[in-house]
Image (cartoon, coloured by chain):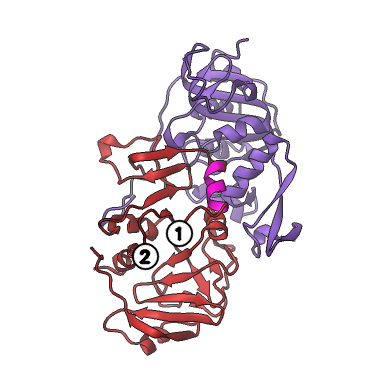
Chain colours: A purple, B red
Amino acid sequence: MNKVVPTADDAVVDIAPGSTIMLGGFGLCGIPENLIAALVKRRITGLHTISNNMGVDGFGMGLMLEAGMIASHIGSYVGENRRLEALVLKGELDLTLIPQGTLAERIRAGGAGIPAFYVPTGLGTVVAEGKETRKIGDRTYVLEQALHADVALIKAWKGDRLGNLVYRKTARNFNPAMAAAAKVTIAEVEVLVEPGELDPDHIVTPGIYVNRIVVGAAYRKPIESKFIQSGGAL
Amino acid sequence: MTGKERIARRIAREFHDGFYVNLGIGLPTMIAGYVPAGIDVMFQSENGMLGVGEPPTDECADPDLINAGKQPVTELPGCSFFASEESFAMIRGGHMDMSILGAMQVDEQGNLANWTIPGKMVKGMGGAMDLVAGARRVIVAMEHQTKDGASRILKECTLPLTGQSVVHDIVTELCWIRVTAEGLVLTEVVEGMNVAEVQARTEAKLLVSPDLCVMTVDALV
């Protein structure tokens, strides 16, 4: 078994226009930047993206947006992307904003064979509009549906040729859940190792979820926000 | 001391040793700088970390180590990393002692609005809806009025809600307000201001606690 593909271009060569694509990352942290760059070269359009954010103007998914590749997007926060805000306000992009935890759990459910589940999140807000609610015990919950995708593009730190993955620090975020929720999962890694080199106790994403693995050619990893509040802060 | 600093210092006094706390982006993030001596608080960042430390120097910033505001942070001994679904399981599951968020509007029912202005601003709720639905205690930390002098504490929110009846306390540079079944109860007012002056800056009706006292911000050591 060998899931390694030589380049990011090879990894995304057969993604069809109009596909639903999940993209890992939180802000610009843990995003599949090489796979995104390869996809942008192909200029395929009509994509339905699912990702917590939308990159920034000029990097990450922002490049896909600027290339006119995205028809609709599901995410939780897009405040760093002015181009997207303008497109949405003009009605040119179909944006669905959902709570971040609900997004994560809908993706997890998609990979776990759970079609829907109840959460307290969003009750009494626009998020619950049109959704079934149910009182369980003394609290009312909102029914949320699982999310699936044709393709997941994810980023890990290290992986082996069987697709086993480990992540680094907060770059894990949505990547493991997305790995399980797509028909085809493509992982880019910084370091490729031989099977057996990763401690089995430390593997976060078992290889069963990963179809292709590629070593990213280069990493820019920009830091999105360096602003630090006065007075000492996180 | 700025108004924001006063808010941050006052809220930091609410922490108990051993608390797990999520701080929202912006003003709430400042609170981490004022934790009283002798109190150990574990800060959670919803992008997947417990045990968030101080900001690094520029040279030491690691792009793989950021907080929910996408700012570089550091690791405290005993910190841990986890995926987003795990992070929100601990939030939704009621494991966070406290969630402190900013707001655009809060009202007499404890409703909170902080994520969108229809037709004007498209940002998103991020993790705010999950946090207010799941944390044991939700504190809103915000400046009392808008830059134009309008009240942010209303009879009823006019913006789309983040959560319905979810706020427990409202802390501004002027006062501490507790949300109760009877309405908003003023429990502390800063020195140099009286109840009538706070009410004049507030659209919502404020009830006055029989235990009303001066809002002090000096850390308890």
Q: Is residue A17 left or right of residue B117?
A: right
The amino acid type found where label 1 is placed reads Met
Residue B48 to residue A212: above or below: below
Which quadrant of the view contains residue A154? Answer: top right
Dot 2: within a 10 Å radius of its alpha carbon, few (fewer than 14), some, or many (20 or more) residues?
Answer: few
| Predominant SS of the magenta segment | helix
Q: Is residue A19 left or right of residue B167?
A: right
Which residue shows up at 46% across the image and 57% down it?
B97
Residue B165 to residue B115: above or below: below
In the image, residue B88 lies in the stretch drawn in magenta: yes
Q: SS for tag 1?
A: strand
The amino acid type found where label 2 is placed reads Glu
Which residue shows up at 49% across the image and 22% down it?
A189
Where are the magenta residues, as a range?
Answer: B86-92
Is residue B30 at all visible to an observer of this figure?
Answer: yes
Which comes sooner in the sequence, label 1 or label 2? 2
Residue B168 to residue A166: above or below: below
Q: Which mark is residue B98?
A: 1
- Residue B182 position, x and y percent, is 55, 82
User: Label 2 marks which chain's residue?
Assistant: B
The answer to whether the residues at label 1 and label 2 have Cβ atoms under 8 Å apart is: yes
Dot 1: within a 10 Å radius of its alpha carbon, few (fewer than 14), some, or many (20 or more) residues?
Answer: many
Q: Which mark is residue B14?
A: 2
The one of A84 and A147 positioned closer to us in this rendering:
A147
Which residue shows up at 40% across the image and 29% down it?
A220
The one of A164 and B197 positioned closer to us in this rendering:
A164
Q: SS for tag 2?
A: loop
Residue B19 to residue B146: above or below: above
- Residue B99 position, x and y percent, is 46, 59
Position of the C terminus of chain B, as image quadrant, is bottom left
